[in-house]
Image (tube, rainbow, N blue to C red):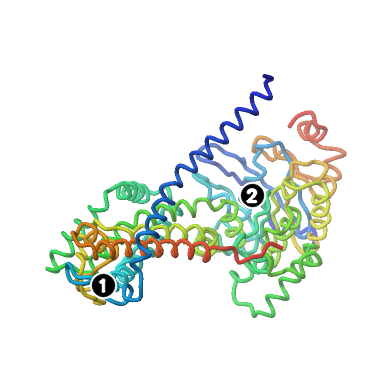
Amino acid sequence: MADLPRLRTEDLTASFGDRPAVKQASLAFPANTLTAIIGPSGCGKSTFLRCLNRLHELSRHATVRGRVLLDDADIYEPDTDPVSVRRRIGMVFQHPNPFPTMSIFDNVAAGLRVNGRLSRADTAVAVERALRSAALWDEVKDRLRASALGLSGGQQQRLCIARAIAPAPDVLLLDEPTSALDPIATQSIEELVQELKRDFTVVMVTHNMQQAARVSDFTAFFYLGELVEHDATTRMFTAPGEARTEAYITGRFG
Amino acid sequence: MSRTARRRALSHAMTGLTMLAALLALLPLFAIFADLVIKGASSINWAFFVEIPPAAGATGGGVANAIVGTLLVVGWGSLIGLPVGIGAGVYLAEYPQTAFARVVRFLADVLNGTPSVIAGIFVWTWVVRPMGHFSGFSGGLSLAVLMLPMVARTTEEMVRLVPHSLREAALALGYPRWRTTLQVMVRTAWPGILTGGLVAVARIAGETAPLLFTALGNLNFKTDLMQPMQTLSLQIYVFATSPFEAWHRLAWGAALVLMAMVLTIGLAARYVTRSRFTRG
């Protein structure tokens, strides 16, 4: 089971106008594993991530070539609706972005409601499950109807994780989820992320190499838009195959 | 004097200057308000609200026709101006780069800077003349014309103030484009949109020039929008320029009532847009 790639890319090239940000990246994400994508700023790691749920194409002059296969079906097929892709691939962003007009409960229920009709009781059950999975339930259970903006930054980010996992996607994308958080909030998100891979295939962009080493099963290193190396995290950080990888993870550039 | 002391003195001086400027800006407002209360309050009694104006030169009477007329004409104008203006503004904010949006935005800016009397002449040409008579209906249309660019542009600004990250959050959850626009972008901007809309309503409630060519005015009590119709602004204009003392007094009272209406709209805007959350 763990060897079967849930999601994989084939020769994925993503550009802004005629400037490629990601060049022919082929990468596989096995089910129920956590892959960290590392690399210096501007190396294309976030762009790569945003290709996986078809968010990149919404940027101005953005183009995508190559294939992204979710359970062996290309999500870039002409007759595939990006909206249905995004319902199967959840995403959490760098800065917590709860909906300010919605309560804590409604934030988590948002993805469920847009997905289809659930009864009131089923929605409540799913919201509680998502909040428990995001390790936030105990902190918010008495104020589910309060504004999500009253939460701390770390709580807001866990709320965003709960919102992303509530519709039970297959894949969870995390775009530097802790870079706007303090060390304590970061630690709780890291612990949470490791729990999440039991239920989801997780892809996490991070510019924090210690974080990648701590939480991931696999690591992919991007440099100047190119996928330099991809391997089990333990091997990447002990015996990298490429000189550039070694230079980056030992802090000699980047 | 040491450098810090000099900087502190300069800071105090500047703070004082800005306070003075704020005071000067508010002074006319308070002066007008005080003047209206002093001169207008004495004209206001029960008859003022339920009777129509007295014949020229006679005393007593009221401006019931103008109060009801204002509500009808402004209401009718807002009924067209608010939804169309908000819709246009949402379009401008959501498709900002299209050629059509650029043209609409430019025209809205031009229209915003056009004297309001032009809106009256425009509606007179295209509605009043073909219909063959003045009417509250055409008056409301001229107010809607005035309102549209104001509402469209403030709506656009309000929607564009919503952080891009919220749009991405919605799209990443699998929201279709239209739901992202309505349930996230517009909903988040809604208090601002509503405030902008109500400011526009308050603004057109005081308009006189476009109504001279459209609603015309009417000394009798009318609720039929197809008839010439009185509004408070028209009543003030006609009575204030008349030679009769009783009409002058009614004009002061009408001005006070109009101001109170605008104030009420402003307070309503604040009430409607208050946060539904108590900060927890």
**Nearer to us in this view, A210 or A53:** A210
Q: Quadrant of residue A192?
A: bottom right
Could you tell me if the residues under marks 1 and 2 are in contact, i.e. CB atoms within 8 Å?
no
Element marked by disc 1: loop
Amino acid type shown at disc 1: Gly
Along the viewing direction, whichever of B36 and B122 lies nearer the viewer: B36
Q: Which residue is mark 2?
A: A10
Which residue does the numbered mark 1 point to in the structure image? Answer: B60
Q: CA distance from mark 1 to mark 2?
A: 87 Å
State the image coordinates of residue A7 (x, y, percent, origin top left). 69, 57
- Image coordinates of residue A137 in percent, x first then y, are 78, 67
SS category of the residue bearing label 2? strand
Q: Is residue B98 above or below residue B174?
A: above
Q: Is residue B253 left or right of residue B271?
A: left
At a point 72% along the width and 50% down the height, the residue shown is A177
Q: Is residue B26 above or below residue B72?
A: above
Q: Judge by depth and name the residue closer to the eye, B176 or A78.
A: B176
Query: What chain letter is assigned to the residue under label 2?
Result: A
In the rendered image, residue B225, in percent from the top left (x then y), is placed at 24, 73
Which residue is at 61% across, 50% downward? A51
Mark 2 crowdedness (10 Å alpha carbons): few <14, some 14-19, many ≥20: some
